[in-house]
Image (cartoon, rainbow, N blue to C red):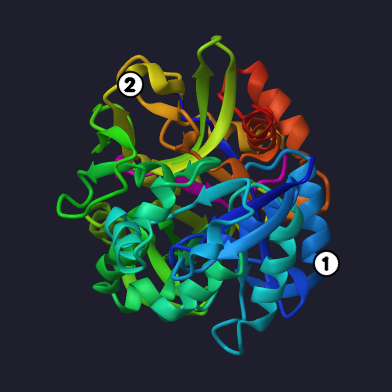
Amino acid sequence: MLEIKRIIPKLEIKNENLIKGIQFEGLRVVGDPIKFAKKFFEDGADQIIIIDIVASLYSRKNLFQTLNKITDDIFIPITAGGGVRSLEDIKKLLEAGADRVSINTFALENQNILGNISEKFGSQFLSILIEVKKIENKYYCMKNHGRDNSGIELEKWVKFLKTKGIGEIVIQSIDDDGMCNGLDDNLLNIIQKLKINKPTVVGCGMGNLDHCIDVLNKDYVSGLTISSSLYSQDIVINKLKSELKKRKIPINEI
Amino acid sequence: MKYKIGILNIGVNNLKSLVSFFKKFGEVKIIENVQSSNYFKNIDILILPGNGNFSYGSNYLLKNDMSDEIKNFKNKIIGICLGMQLLFEKSEESPNSRGLGIIDGKVKKITAKNIRLPLLGWYTCKDNLEQKKNYFFNNSYICNPQDKSIITQKIDTDVELLPSCINFKNVYGIQFHPEKSSRNGYNLILKILNE
């Protein structure tokens, strides 16, 4: 059965703004996240990921408001996250319109919570976000939007997650973020070797159509997140999809 | 025509998206419980939503004593995802829980080895006229009705029978999320409402 490859704009928000950094730092304001989300929906996005990068520091009010507005007019799956710390946070994100909740730090720090969450909400509901950084030739899972090292290596974390009831794994490469030079091949090789038995989304570093095609051509990749290059229109979703189609990579024509 | 659409709030679901979506078809009312039998009055279409574990949905129906009201509802009922599964009596996801039992058969885990679970993402479905369309799925279990003739659409694969839509009398079941399937989801609901 063909798994259709997903093109997923990843929107990072800070307060009411869509922002973008380079390697998770030096954040600049891009614009209104709702306008961008609508545009990407119209351009044929298959899903949208929205992460409030300061929610863990302040409050999640802005994320709720943004989510609420986005789900008024956008009828594709929305994954929301940023600073999720409790079952209550998850419930609130769902109520605000998220279809799936993205969890990073909370999962790394409370590994036994994963069972509880899937029991309550169904296993497919959880999206585990992994933000990796290469340190001395090893890939570590970072916490708090790249600020702190969990000390847990990617391989170890993924092997643990494979035994848990979770919906999908989203792996982001901090070193490639905003660089537009493509995604680290070495990281992709590691992901391939991990033989992840769940939908696997990867991202960071997409600067042109070829970068995207290279990644989506890999059978273990279910979806690709893109940020900066969508804002700058160096990558346009419709165009990317027609290139993928030419290469017989299964995409969703909507 | 503008429909009066009632959406059952069974506690664990993406209610907000459903409400926004069904507003495109008419007036939406969220039904919190059916303690008062007036709740289902004046409703053209009852939506049984769901996102989550079979036991949660089942417990909710039980706790709120909803089953009979739903079974007796004469207008269209549309079960979506878990809501479709709750139309059946039993699910392998939670063997001790009971669904509504409106449709004979059971909900089973998807078993084909080469299908990666959960089904999460867009899959191609084929209706009885061999027309193919993509819809957004998010599930690991699938409905297996005893009477295969009620299957109106299935996932386009040969490895296992994976019904994506069923229709039995006034009852419709949709395994994927029409509210998340962009234009395809909208067109499907429009078709059901016009039937």
Measured as percent of width and height from the top left, residue B17 is found at 62, 57
Q: Work out whether residue A196 or residue A34 is closer to the camera in this orientation and state it.
A: A34
Amino acid type at circle 2 is Leu
In reply to whether residue A244 is colored magenta, the answer given is no
Q: Are marks 2 and 1 in contact (CB under 8 Å)?
A: no
Q: Residue furthest bottom?
A: A58
Q: Please tell me the numbered disc located at residue B161.
A: 2
Q: Range of the magenta residues?
A: A193-208
Q: Secondary structure at mark 1?
A: loop
Mark seen at residue A32? 1
Q: Chain of mark 2?
A: B
Q: Amino acid at mark 1?
A: Asp
The answer, for residue A242, to whether it is visible in the render is: yes
Q: For residue A111, which quarter of the picture?
A: bottom left
B126 up-or-down from B55: above or below: above
Q: At 25% from the left edge and 57% from the top edge, which residue is drawn? A: A164
Give the Cα distance between marks 2 and 1: 44 Å
Is A86 on the left-hand or right-hand side of A252? left
Q: Residues within 10 Å of mark 1 (few under 14, many from 20)?
A: some
